[in-house]
Structure formats: structure tokens, C-alpha cells
Image: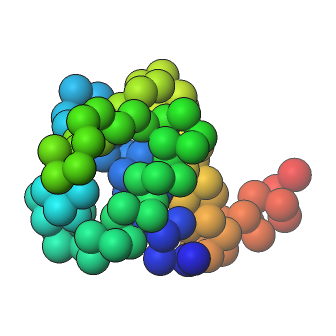
Amino acid sequence: MKMIGNIKNRLIRFLANHPHSADSVSGIGKFWLGGEDPQLVSAALVALAEQGLVECRGNGANVIFLAHDSDRLRELAHQQDTAGTRRAEILDGQDVKRRKTI
């Protein structure tokens, strides 16, 4: 499940930056995510669709996925970036320095 979570996060960031993109599961895995396993990509996309963040159009072999809630995707990507910055600060010891000066 950790791998799917990582793929979901990468898809959120990608769609936040490219809100008009649309592609098939294999295209997303290959072109958006640099060669990710299509089964994992599919599971991540289904989870994002269940959350209302992406939508699926078409059927069978012609299914494509695209952003559904661009505002929420941008908000989530921003939260990821902020959380990543915060983790990096803690790892760099900046959090300890900040506490000592307060």
C-alpha cells in the first residue's frame, strides 16, 4: 500500500501542475510517472477517483483519466510540499535550533 500512496502523491502533484492532462493508465505510468507498474497506477487512480479528485472517461481499452477537482489537487499538492519542507527542516536540525531560540 505504501507504493500506491507514493504514486497517488505523485499523481496529485502532477495533476496540480498539469490540470488539463489526460491519459490512459499505461500512458500515465509511462509518461507522467516514468515507467511505473500499470497495476499500481490503476489502483492509485481508482483511489483518487473514489476521493473525487480524478475522473474516468470512456470504457474498456479507451478509458482515460483526468483531473476532476483541480482546486483540491492544488491544495493537496501544496500540503505535500509544506509537509516535505517541514520534514526536511526537522532532519536538518533546524527545528531544534528554532526551539532553542523561542
Residue at point 22%, 27% (across, down) = 20
Q: Is residue 75 above or below residue 4?
A: above
Q: Front-most of 78 and 62? A: 62
Q: Position of residue 82 (x, y in %)?
A: 57, 47
Does residue 89 appear to the left or right of 74 in the view shown?
Answer: right
Figure label count: 0
Q: Quadrant of the N terminus?
A: bottom right
Please state if 4 lies on the left or on the right of 91 as rendered: left
Q: Can you say whether 28 is above or below 100 in the image?
A: above
Task: Using residue 14 as the reference point, say whether residue 89 is left or right of it.
Answer: right
Taking the spot 49% from the left edge, 35% from the top edge, the residue there is 53
Residue at the extreme front: 60
Tell me where residue 102 appears, x and y as whole percent: 87, 52
Q: Who's the residue at 54% across and 34% down the image?
A: 52
Residue 70 percent across, percent down from the top left: 42, 25
Residue drawn 59% across and 40% down?
A: 51
Q: Is residue 91 visible?
A: yes
> In which image quadrant can residue 63 be found?
top left
On the question of residue 17 being in view, the answer is: no
- Applied colour scheme: rainbow
Q: Residue 28's spot in the image, x, y percent?
A: 21, 55
